[in-house]
Amino acid sequence: MVCLTFYGGVNEIGGNKILLEDGDARIFLDFGQSFTMGVDYFTGWLGPRGINGLGDYFEFGLLPKIRGLYTAEQLRFTDLLYEEPQFDGVFLSHAHVDHVNHIQFLHPKIPLYLGIGTKLFLEAMEKTSSFCDYGKHRYRTFRTGDKIKVGDLVVEPVHVDHSIPAAYGFLIHTSEGTVVYTGDLRAHGPRRDMTEDFMDKARKSEPVAMICEGTRMVEEERRKNYSEEQVAKLSRKIVSSTDKMVFVTHYSRDMDRFRSMYNAAKKNDRKIVVSPKTAHLMARLLEDKRLDLPDPLKDNEILVYYKRKKSGEFDERDYYVWEREFMDRMVTYEFVRENQGGLLMDLDFYQFAELIDIRPDPGSHFIHSMSEPYSEEDIEDIVMHNWLEHFKMRFHQLHASGHMDRQQITDLSNYINPKKLFPIHTENPQLFKKTCNNVQTVGYGNEYTL
Ligand SMILES: [Zn+2]
């Protein structure tokens, strides 16, 4: 008997935590944090207390109360009894927060299976963020083509295209047949061939069930979405149309987007300016040869922007050790100010104060290469536009989603044709019923037998 229980990603986008049990074998598919976790109880500086371990999370039902999953330390102040680990592994589909963040609570004896690139992402995040600590784990890396035996289960990771490298879906071969898990995926990125590969393998396995993401399963899409190719083309056009500064902001882990912007700069004889954090991430990702990224220490097209810190004199000692690695490539606000027409600069919203030092000429460009805000009252969006207006900069919205749209999800599920379809990672699971077959919507913590 095979059972599926959903402890996250239920009626919401993200937070996937799916338990699959087959006889004695018990694995989790992803162990992420929901984007809206705890928003009803925590805000601003009011957050769960570290000292109370999982206590503050259990109080509001923010993590499942399951024995044999967490460390004794995390359970110290809770009413959940500590037991030795009773799980054979957690399989991570990719390194986005909503798929990995809660591994910090997992017992270190439970093996974590993940792509080589995903491990590099986790390490880079721990290194460059003072808030990020995933804890100690037994990491076991995999590649497409591997077949991982866990008890009587065989798990087959298959690469997919998503807005982060090293993203995978899984075929889990169980005693009742194959269960397919899509992870997050799209078919309009530069590696759509990988998603097609996944779809073919999934279809051939004649799955008894498919757990399918539905981020963009919406009645009507109001936001403009491009393909990555279009984003690349349109950003090239913006850069070639001006002799002024061009700034861009995008998700730091989206390496396809980095490549699009890198090429837009290169084709227009500009250099790309990145933060030490991005440079560090890229340098680490070089270890995964298949990702084929430029080396920030060797590539002359890349410059690294150092902010004023501590002494204000750009002294080596002002910066973290991991930041110092790129000081040979250092540029400061003065260089950027004097070379505006020759640069394309990565500038995160939280680094906007640098604009005061850089003083971009009026008419400079800003490409917002991220999702549009959900609401018109989005505070950060309002503040961002105030800054752009203050410096008389021109705004462009250019983004390609990491997810399939409604039609593509429908085509995917009809092509793979599972005996049962469990929609997750979506606010609209009921919409699947309109266009897909054999849909079983899920409730939080409910067990579904195959
Ligand atoms: Zn994702």
Image: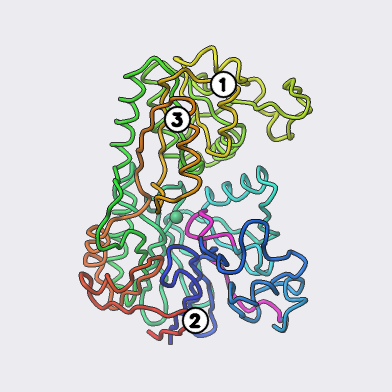
Alpha carbon of mark 2 to alpha carbon of mark 1: how far? 52 Å
Q: Is residue 281 above or below residue 219?
A: above
Q: Residue 445 got which mark?
A: 2
**Rendered location of residue 274, percent (x, y):** 54, 29
Q: Is residue 163 above or below residue 103?
A: above
Q: Quick one: SS at disc 1?
A: helix
Q: Are marks 2 and 1 in contact (CB under 8 Å)?
A: no
Disc 2 marks which amino acid?
A: Gly
- Residue at image point 38% right, 47% down: 372
Alpha carbon of mark 3 to alpha carbon of mark 2: how far? 48 Å
- Ligand 1, what quadrant? bottom left
Q: Which residue is mark 1?
A: 358
Q: Is residue 182 above or below residue 193?
A: below
- Residue at image point 51% right, 56% down: 142
Disc 1 marks which amino acid?
A: Ile
Callout in the foreground (2, 1): 1
